[in-house]
Image (cartoon, rainbow, N blue to C red):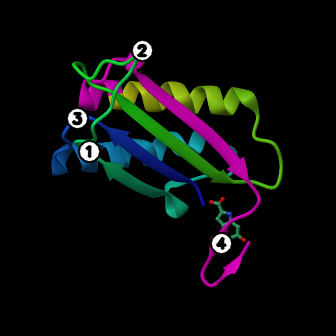
Amino acid sequence: MPCIITHTSQPISPEQRERMKAQFGKAIADLPGKSEMWLLCAFEDNVPMYFGGDDSEPVAFVEVNAYSTSEVPRSAWERLSADIQKIVSTELHVPTNRMYVREIASPDWGWNGGNF
Ligand SMILES: O=C(O)c1cc2cc(O)c(O)cc2[nH]1
């Protein structure tokens, strides 16, 4: 059960959201055993955001959460981070130097009334 949450100062049109959702669905396979089937995507646009104290240019913060009982290889996170940065910079015109991607794996996930 991965989850990708995109916060950005940019507006996101329904068409951009659909394309990003589809591309995130492919990119999530960078993580071992993950696929779009369990992927939750959330988009929060038009957020007041400052990078380095400056809100005059686009900013984004992307949170990637993954259920895992073992350590996710650093190389997998690096591939996914690069893919996400490419998707967000291309679709939303946020420069990669004004964007953070936060990657977290945890065994503690609730779903369907219980925990995995
Ligand atoms: O996407 C995952 O990480 C994921 C989905 C899923 C479904 C399931 O029934 C499990 O027991 C584990 C699991 N992990």
Disc 4: which residue = 110
Give x and y (percent) for residue 57.
24, 19
Whether residue 74 is visible to the viewer of this picture, yes or no, is yes
- Determine crowd level at label 4: few under 14, some 14-19, many 20+ residues with C-alpha closer than 10 A: few
- Where 1 sits versus 75, above or below? below
In magenta, the rendered stretch is 89-116
Say whether marks 3 and 1 touch (CB < 8 Å). Answer: yes
First along the sequence among labels 3 and 2: 3
Residue type (three-letter) at the residue carrying disc 3: Gln
Disc 1: which residue = 45
Give x and y (percent) for residue 84.
45, 32
- Determine crowd level at label 2: few under 14, some 14-19, many 20+ residues with C-alpha closer than 10 A: few
Secondary structure of residue under mark 4 = strand
Foreground pick, 22 / 40: 40
Secondary structure of residue under mark 2 = helix
First along the sequence among labels 1 and 4: 1
First along the sequence among labels 1 and 2: 1
Disc 2: which residue = 97
Give x and y (percent) for residue 80.
56, 33
Distance between the Cα atoms at labels 1 and 4? 26 Å
Distance between the Cα atoms at labels 3 and 2? 15 Å
Disc 3: which residue = 10
Foreground pick, 7 / 72: 7
**Label 1 beta carbon less than 8 Å to ligand 1:** no
Q: With 110 as the anchor, is 22 left or right in this view?
A: left
